[in-house]
């Protein structure tokens, strides 16, 4: 793992020689552009043309050997294990080279071995495989054309272009964009550029079974698997690491494990005039001795950055945007580009942490199964949330091994003694202050006041309580149209203009 991976890419795989690599469109990710041009070695192989973005101008995006070419955005987290089965020491190999070695030994099913945060394109003979990691944490989009296929990690890059893609298996329409399709999570789609030949294979599915293990064993296993997920995400031993810390059990666990072994960790917390969790975060930062920073932003300023959150996540779901907005705002406040950021995001999904009032274990397990079956396409873990500010983000709770274990634990280990996320809290008891271990869950949109800030702004211009949800949904759709479909830079999209547009569309009077 390099500390600065390939952040994203846009590639055309075609049947005719390209004239150039294409220019980088108005693009929200920040990085060094690396041209990608690959000539076919034998007839039938596709031409590659396009570019990749990296945090480091010396990065190489593509690895090739024996007629197989690999492009990998992101990183792999079990390099040593993968090296051991492909007969190479992983040291010195880039993640793209490691995936290539894996492919040469196992073929496409090698993708089932990979635990990482990645989106990959692999070409062999006349076929191209486009693949997401187990949870699709790097969204991957494609548009098929008569002369090939365009593949990109941001949908907005593919927004311009006529015609419909054919509905390749393993893909779904991207919201609001005709002809752009998103590769599903944990899926490898094999295509023949320029044809409608395609098939899909699943590389991962959330476990449906549940494990019975003793509470002690469960705690130990959670502590071990999470510790490894955090360690493999920290970069080199001297690389600085930053953690977004709310002071809740999820982010505090990540910071505790990252600080183990004396590594210096910087922690950052966001608050607004409406709310903050600064006191809770400070308890953790002091206990663990991190270099801690508090950022405060007015709730109005926060909400006005919604176009950035939409441009990054490329979704239209207003509720999910409320979770993502504070993080997007916080990432934009981090000064040095190229920061590696770890988060506690996502622990609640396999542990059922959002369902605080769900009393019965049966219902708790049902909502966990539902949430694990429906996360795909929400783009909550998209690297673009951070990469548009030039940073790389990673989420230990959605490590494949962590997710497998947490999802599969029987629900009585998740809700126990009247406490949510019991097994995680107990696993971290030795490392964190008791106040942190027992602190009730507060969602990021609640702690930062995001949900209420957006509502307040709408109420102030006269939106009735019963119209709040529909106005938010309509605004999200307009932000999406402008920043994704029309590729307008998010900084040029005015919150007030969009609000006015939506109000007049819905025949609501603005009282400003
Ligand atoms: P939550 O919805 O509280 O589970 O938040 C998800 C993740 O976002 C947490 O685990 C933290 O890493 C981060 N986070 C949440 N709230 C804040 C905050 N106010 N400041 C910094 N990071 C936060
Ligand atoms: Mg929280």
Image: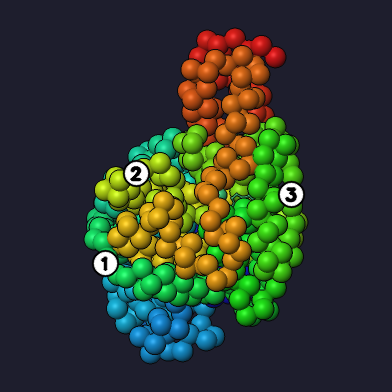
What percent of the width, then of the height, locates residue 273?
72, 36
Disc sitting over residue 116 in the figure: none
- Which badge, 2 or 3, comes first in the chain's sequence? 3
In three-dimensional space, the C-alpha distance between marks 2 and 3, rounded to whole angstroms, equals: 36 Å
Q: Quadrant of residue 244?
A: bottom right
SS for callout 3 = strand
- Which badge, 1 or 3, comes first in the chain's sequence? 1
In the depicted structure, whether residue 378 falls above or below residue 192: above
Q: Which residue corresponds to mark 3? A: 295
In three-dimensional space, the C-alpha distance between marks 1 and 2, rounded to whole angstroms, equals: 20 Å
Please tell me which residue is depicted at 67% across the width and 78% down the height of the picture: 262
Please tell me which residue is depicted at 57% across the width and 40% down the height of the picture: 446
> Is residue 237 shown to the viewer in this render?
yes
In the depicted view, which residue is nearer to us: 386 or 63?
386
In the image: residue 195, left or right of residue 257: left
Instruction: Say which quadrant the C terminus sits in.
Output: top right
Mark 3 close to ligand 1, CB under 8 Å: yes
Q: Which color mode does the image show? A: rainbow
What percent of the width, then of the height, locates residue 464?
54, 15
SS for callout 2 = loop
Closest to the camera, between mark 1 and mark 3, is: 1
Disc sitting over residue 359 in the figure: 2
């Amino acid at each position: 793992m390099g500390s600065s991976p390939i952040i994203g890419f846009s590639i055309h795989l075609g049947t005719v020689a390209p004239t150039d690599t294409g220019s980088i469109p108005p693009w929200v990710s920040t990085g060094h552009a690396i041209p990608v041009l690959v000539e076919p070695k034998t007839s039938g192989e596709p031409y590659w043309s396009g570019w990749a973005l990296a945090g480091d101008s010396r990065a190489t995006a593509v690895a090739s050997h024996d007629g197989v070419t690999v492009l990998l955005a992101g990183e792999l987290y079990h390099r040593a294990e993968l090296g051991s089965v492909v007969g190479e020491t992983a040291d010195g190999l880039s993640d793209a080279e490691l995936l290539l070695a894996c492919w040469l030994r196992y073929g496409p099913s090698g993708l089932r071995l990979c635990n990482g945060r990645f989106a990959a394109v692999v070409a062999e003979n006349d076929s191209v495989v486009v693949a997401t990691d187990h949870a699709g944490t790097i969204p991957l989009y494609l548009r098929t054309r008569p002369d090939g296929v365009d593949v990109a990690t941001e949908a907005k890059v593919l927004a311009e272009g006529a015609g419909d893609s054919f509905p390749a298996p393993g893909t779904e329409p991207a919201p609001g964009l005709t002809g752009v399709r998103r590769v599903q999570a944990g899926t490898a789609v094999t295509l023949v550029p320029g044809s409608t030949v395609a098939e899909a294979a699943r590389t991962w599915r959330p476990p449906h079974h549940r494990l019975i293990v003793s509470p002690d064993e469960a705690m130990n296993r959670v502590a071990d698997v999470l510790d490894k997920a955090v360690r493999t995400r920290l970069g080199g031993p001297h690389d600085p690491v930053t953690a977004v810390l709310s002071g809740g059990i999820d982010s505090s666990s990540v910071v505790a494990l990252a600080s183990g072994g004396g590594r210096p960790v910087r922690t950052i917390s966001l608050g607004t005039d409406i709310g903050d969790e600064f006191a809770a975060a400070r308890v953790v930062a002091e206990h663990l001795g991190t270099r801690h920073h508090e950022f405060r932003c007015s709730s109005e300023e926060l909400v006005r950055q919604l176009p950035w959150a939409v441009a990054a996540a490329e979704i239209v779901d207003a509720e999910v945007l409320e979770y993502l907005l504070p993080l997007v705002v916080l990432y934009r406040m981090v000064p040095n580009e190229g920061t590696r950021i770890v988060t506690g995001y996502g622990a609640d999904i396999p542990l059922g942490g959002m369902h605080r009032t769900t009393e019965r274990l049966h219902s708790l397990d049902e909502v966990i199964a539902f949430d694990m079956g429906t996360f795909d396409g929400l783009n909550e873990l998209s690297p673009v949330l951070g990469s548009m500010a030039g940073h790389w983000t990673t989420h230990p709770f959605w490590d494949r091994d962590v997710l497998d274990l947490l999802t599969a634990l029987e629900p009585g280990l998740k809700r126990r003694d009247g406490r949510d996320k019991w097994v995680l809290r107990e696993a971290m008891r030795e490392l964190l202050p008791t106040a942190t271990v027992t602190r009730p869950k507060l969602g990021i949109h609640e702690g930062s006041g995001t949900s209420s800030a957006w509502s307040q702004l709408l109420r102030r211009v006269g939106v009735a309580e019963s119209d709040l949800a529909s106005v938010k949904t309509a605004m999200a759709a307009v932000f999406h149209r402008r920043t994704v479909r029309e590729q307008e830079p998010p900084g040029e999209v005015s919150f007030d203009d969009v609000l006015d547009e939506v109000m007049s569309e819905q025949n609501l009077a603005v009282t400003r």
